[in-house]
Amino acid sequence: MWRHIASNAITFLVVLVFLLGGVVLWGQNEYTSEGPLTERICLQVKPGSNMRGVSRQLEDAGAISNGSIYRVGAEYSGKNSRLKAGSWLVPEGASMQEIVDIVTRGGASTCGTEVVYRIGVTRSEARVRELDPATDAYVERAEFDLAAEERPEIYAKVREEADTRYRIAIAEGVTSWQIVNALGQIDLLEGAADKLPPEGSLAPDSYEVSAGDTVAGVLERMDAEQDLRLAETWENRAEGIPLKDPYEALILASIIEKETGLPEERGQVASVFTNRLEQGMKLQTDPTVIYGVTEGKGVLGRGLRQSELRKRTDWNTYVIDGLPPTPIANPGRASLEAAVNPEDTDFIFFVADGTGGHAFARTLEEHNKNVAEWRKIEAERATE
């Protein structure tokens, strides 16, 4: 009798083990298999949230099939306590395992609301925008001038949200004064610049920032990035260029930056100035004259006067020989690369061609024809 009972008990345990094993395998498969989400979503994890609450959010959104399996998987993988607050983009078909990785990885939010502070040559502004998960495109919610005293209500609202991302976008060709002035208008940042950074020393780029970051700290990051870029481009410079050191390359790059906004033209513009330096010709470039007038503090807002073209300043390249003593703006990487690796051309002149680009010439005769054509275009536009 006891032998029969023992035999049945063993059989029951064996069956139970197999059943449990099957449940475990099923759970593992559910955890790692493609999920039911048909369209990507933006999952907001608020500070103080836990995996149980997140699993309910995911179930309600139709992103997971079983909240218990999700929580067990997160616990088993050791990630249950690593939940990060923020807004996280969950792609369609994401498995529970992939979602756990997304919400515990950390870093900047990958969706939700973003504030971009854009520092440009003629205007500095802030834009509040939100990622639409369905289209993977940002929708503009508000835009305002950084110099404006009043800010949109939505800006104040998103400033209170813990998962809002902030980014400062610096345009190529802005001056150090323009950057410092604009940073001082960003209420997210604290403090002020210790001093005005040298012209050309700040790298135009996009910088992630957070509430409490300092103006001085952001400037240090920009300075370090420009140092790195300048060192890299100088290391890879072409042989025989008429530049003595990286600083001269920085000066030339700033002139190239201000002379053309077309990426495909930078190498040609660089070749004109390189050829002029090699031939001992004056650079004769208007942006340097303008810098001598404004000292980089804002935009001139009008054409140059003949008296300004004749007046001697350290930056008037119609009067001085060679390069000016300092950069005239903060150049981007592409202009740095063009300065030390100019195209191989015979061009020594260029003038606007009416399309946003320039007409290049090898001789004064060719250049005069191009200038006449440009004057004709200017006259036609004046009558429109």
Image (tube, helix red, strand yellow):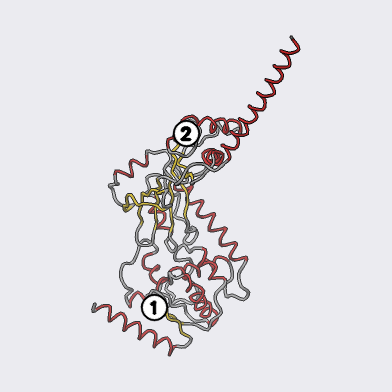
Label 1, residues with CA under 10 Å away: few <14, some 14-19, many ≥20: some
For residue 255, side relative to residue 152 (left or right) = right
What residue is disc 1 on?
352
Determine the residue located farthest toward the top in the rendered image.
Answer: 1
Q: Residue at x 60, y 34 (%)?
A: 26
Quarter of the figure that contains the C terminus:
bottom left
- Between 243 and 206, the one nearer to me in the picture: 206
Question: Identity of the amino acid at label 2?
Answer: Val
Question: How far is mark 2 from mark 1, CA to CA?
Answer: 58 Å
Image x and y of residue 215, in percent: 44, 48
Q: Residue at x 42, y 71 (%)?
A: 288
- Is 23 drawn above or below residue 362 in the view shown? above
Q: Residue at x 31, y 52 (%)?
A: 144
What residue is disc 2 on?
54
Compare marks 2 and 1 and give the one earlier in the sequence. 2
Quarter of the figure that contains the N terminus:
top right
Q: Secondary structure at mark 2?
A: helix
Label 2, residues with CA under 10 Å away: few <14, some 14-19, many ≥20: many
- Between 22 and 179, the one nearer to me in the picture: 22
* Disc number lying in front (2 or 1): 2
Q: Secondary structure at mark 1?
A: strand
Determine the residue located farthest toward the bottom in the rendered image.
Answer: 365
Image x and y of residue 117, in percent: 39, 52
Question: Identity of the amino acid at label 1?
Answer: Ala
* Residue 50, numbered circle: none
- Is 359 drawn above or below residue 66 in the view shown? below
Q: Residue at x 49, y 68 (%)?
A: 325
Residue 175, picture quadrant: bottom left
Image x and y of residue 171, in percent: 43, 60
